Amino acid sequence: MSAAHPPDRIPDDVVQLVAQARRPVVLTGAGISAESGVPTFREVQTGLWERFSAQDLASVEAFEADPALVWTWYRWRQSLIRAVEPNPGHIAIAEWQQLPGVGLTLSTQNVDDLHERAGASVLAHLHGSIFAHRCFSCDEPVELPDADYDGFQSPPAAQPPPTCGACDGPVRPGVVWFGEMLPTEAFEQTAAAVRAADLVLVAGTSGIVQPAASLPLLALERGTPLIEVNPEETELSELMDHCVRGPSGEVLPKLLRG
Ligand code: OAD
């Protein structure tokens, strides 16, 4: 059973768990980038996109039904991500990873690059990268310049995806869509790190999307301490030893600096 703590009253034993960890694993989701200005998946979209939830757009079926709509949504989201900066949560994790004697493994469900831009090394992007593109038909990687959209302004009109130079198929974003397999190596390496961890910290994920949400269970089986950082209760909260109920940009620097 987990204990929930407000961000201004993090108990010393939770701070100690973090300070003493030598092989921590940090698992992050969309919430870690929320304070940078990247909307999470279950937040209501605005403007023209109001009618299209991320859930509805992130699938093979959606791309087949309306490639221009899905392609433009991802290109618009890329522009937004390029325009924002890592927040104190990303920076705290990067600093933790750089501490002498700490072998911190970081795996994220996020397709953005904000952990890397904060200076962290990411073992696995479990759901791929929004900046990688490949052919929908033949899987050939495709390099493209950044989209020229304003991620903060009204969404652009839908444009069809470019076509692949090798087979003429439509180009798709290099993310994992609902119903698709996660990259096996990324998942297995993260699972191995969780099994070997002496602390697992889960930040900014609703714990709804499988199989990523099953990773903390591997720690539970071994009795490894689990800490959640999230302003809301989640599907994973029950499994946790400690939940710190606050935004990661506020909580993580406090957790790490005591
Ligand atoms: P979700 O959008 O499902 O959940 C975001 C979580 O972040 C929620 O639990 C929020 O309470 C929490 N949150 C919001 N603001 C926060 C803050 N400032 N600090 C910390 N936490 C905060 O995002 P994910 O769990 O990452 O998959 O979603 C998992 C997957 O669902 C995504 O990778 C994507 C999506 O559909 C695919 O596209 C396959």
Image (spheres, rainbow, N blue to C red):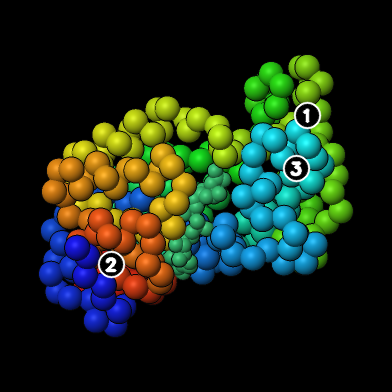
Residue 117 appearing in the image: no
Where is the N terminus found, in terms of image quarters? bottom left
Identify the mark nearer the N-term, 2 or 1. 1
Q: Residue 173's spot in the image, x, y percent?
A: 66, 38
| Quarter of image, res 241 | bottom left
Q: Which residue is mark 1?
A: 170
At a point 52% along the width and 65% down the height, the residue shown is 34
Q: Residue at x 77, y 66 (%)?
A: 47
**Could you tell me how far apart the alpha carbons at marks 1 and 3 are, in whole angstroms?**
10 Å
Classify mark 3: residues with Cα within 10 Å, few (<14), some (14-19) or many (20+).
Answer: many
Can you tell which mark lies on residue 243?
2
Picture residue at 72% right of the left edge, 55% below the top: 52
Q: Which mark is residue 236?
A: none
Whole-angstrom CA distance, mark 2 to mark 1, is 44 Å
Is residue 247 something one can see in this rendering? yes
Picture coordinates of residue 167 (x, y %)?
78, 17
The residue under label 3 is: 71
Q: Nearer the viewer, residue 150 or 49?
A: 49
Q: Are marks 1 and 3 in contact (CB under 8 Å)?
A: yes
Name the residue at 38% across, 62% down. 234
In this view, the residue in front, 250 or 4, is 4
**Disc 2 marks which amino acid?**
Cys
Callout 1, which amino acid? Pro
Q: First in sequence: mark 3 or mark 2?
A: 3
Rendered location of residue 53, percent (x, y): 66, 55
Label 1 or label 3, whichever comes before in sequence order? 3
Which numbered mark, 2 or 1, is in the foreground of this view? 2
SS class, disc 3: helix
